[in-house]
Image (cartoon, helix red, strand yellow):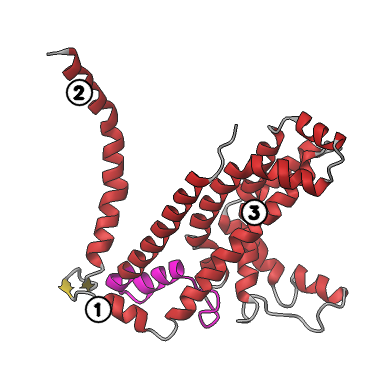
Amino acid sequence: MTSTRKNKLQNMVFVLPLITFIVVFVAYPVSSVIYNSFFKINLNGTQTYIGLRNFEQFFARRYTSQLFLNTGLWVGLGVLLKIGIAMIISLALVKNFPLKKTVMQSLIIPWAMPTVIACIIWKMMYQPLFGYINSTFLSLGLINEPLDWLGNKDTAFMATLIVNVWSTVPLGVLNISSAMATIPAHYYEAALIDGSSAWNDFRHITLPLIAPVLRMLLLLYTIWTFNAFDAIFMMTGGGPNHASETLVVNIYLTGFEANNIGQASAISVVCLIILTILSIMYLNNSRKGESYD
C-alpha cells in the first residue's frame, strides 16, 4: 500500500465519526421531516400521500399571518433587546469597581438556571393578585388595578419575551465584555490625548473591534430566539388566543395536540427555509465585514 493511499484511508477514518454524526443527527431527521410534510399521517402510523396539501392548509388557516407576525416580532425585538442590554451592561463592566467579580458571577445565574425554574419564578412574579410586579406597580401608582400579565392578549407577548431576554442576555454580556477586555488600552489613551469624546471612542474604537463578536451573537441569538419554545409553552402555551404563539410553538401544538404530524412537518420545513435564508444572509454579510486584527 502506497503512503498516499494510506494517508487517504487514515483521513477517512478520522472524518468518519463526523460524517456519521451529520447523517444520524442532521441529514436523517431533516430528510424525514421533508418526507413527512407530503403525507397525511394517522395515529396508527398509516401514511397517505397528499402532495402540497399540508402546506396549503397551513397557509390557509385564519391565524397563520399572526404566527408569522408574532415570530417576526419575537425574533426582531428579542435580538435587539438582548444585544442592546448586553452592550450596555458590558460597557458598565469595563471599568473596575468594588464587587465587580461578584456582579459578573451573579449575571450567570439567569443563563445557568433551568428554564422550568425560571418560568415558575416569573409566573409567580406575574401572578395577578399576589405577584411582585403588580404589587410594585400598584405601590408606584403606575397601574390602577392588578393586571393579568399572562392572561391578557395585550401583555402576554411582551411578558413572555422578557423572560426569554432575561435568561439569555448573560451570554451576550460574557462575550461582549470579553471582547472589550482584549482592546489595547493605548487606543483609548491616544484618543483621549486627541480630545475624543466617550461616544466617539465607542463608535470608532470599541464598536469596530468587537464587530466580529457582535456578528456571531447576531446569528446565534437569531437562531436561538427563533427556536425558543420552552419559555413560551410553559408561560402561556401560546395564548391567549394565539397572542404569544410563534411558528415553533405551533409546530408542537399541531403535531402533538392536534395530532397532525404531516402538517407539523410542513411548518417545520417552512421554519427550516427561513432559518437557512437568514444563515446565508449572515454568512454573506460576515464575509464583507472587517476582520479583527
Q: Please rate how many residues cluster around mark 2, counting C-alpha atoms within 10 Å: few if below 14, some from 14 to 19, many from 20.
A: few
Q: Nearer the viewer, residue 207 or 231?
A: 207
Residue at screen point 49% across, 79% down: 66
Q: Amino acid at mark 2?
A: Leu
Q: Amino acid at mark 3?
A: Ile
Residue 260 % position (x, y): 30, 74
User: Circle 3 sits on which residue?
Assistant: 83
User: Circle 2 sits on which residue?
Assistant: 9
Gap in angstroms between the C-alphas marked 3 and 2: 46 Å
The disc placed on residue 265 is none
- Image: magenta residue range: 239-264
Residue occupying the far front of the picture: 194
Q: Secondary structure at mark 2?
A: helix
The reply to whether callout 1 and callout 3 are in contact (CB within 8 Å) is no
Label located before the other in sequence (2 or 1): 2
Label located before the other in sequence (1 or 3): 1
Residue 35 % position (x, y): 22, 63
The reply to whether callout 3 and callout 2 are in contact (CB within 8 Å) is no
User: Circle 1 sits on which residue?
Assistant: 53
Q: Secondary structure at mark 3?
A: helix
For residue 92, side relative to residue 110 (left or right):
right
Q: Please rate how many residues cluster around mark 1, counting C-alpha atoms within 10 Å: few if below 14, some from 14 to 19, many from 20.
A: some
Label located before the other in sequence (3 or 2): 2
Q: Amino acid at mark 1?
A: Arg
The reply to whether callout 2 and callout 1 are in contact (CB within 8 Å) is no
Using the image, determine if residue 5 lies above or below residue 102.
Answer: above
Residue at screen point 29% across, 33% down: 17
Q: Quadrant of the N terminus?
A: top left
Using the image, determine if residue 79 lies above or below residue 14.
Answer: below
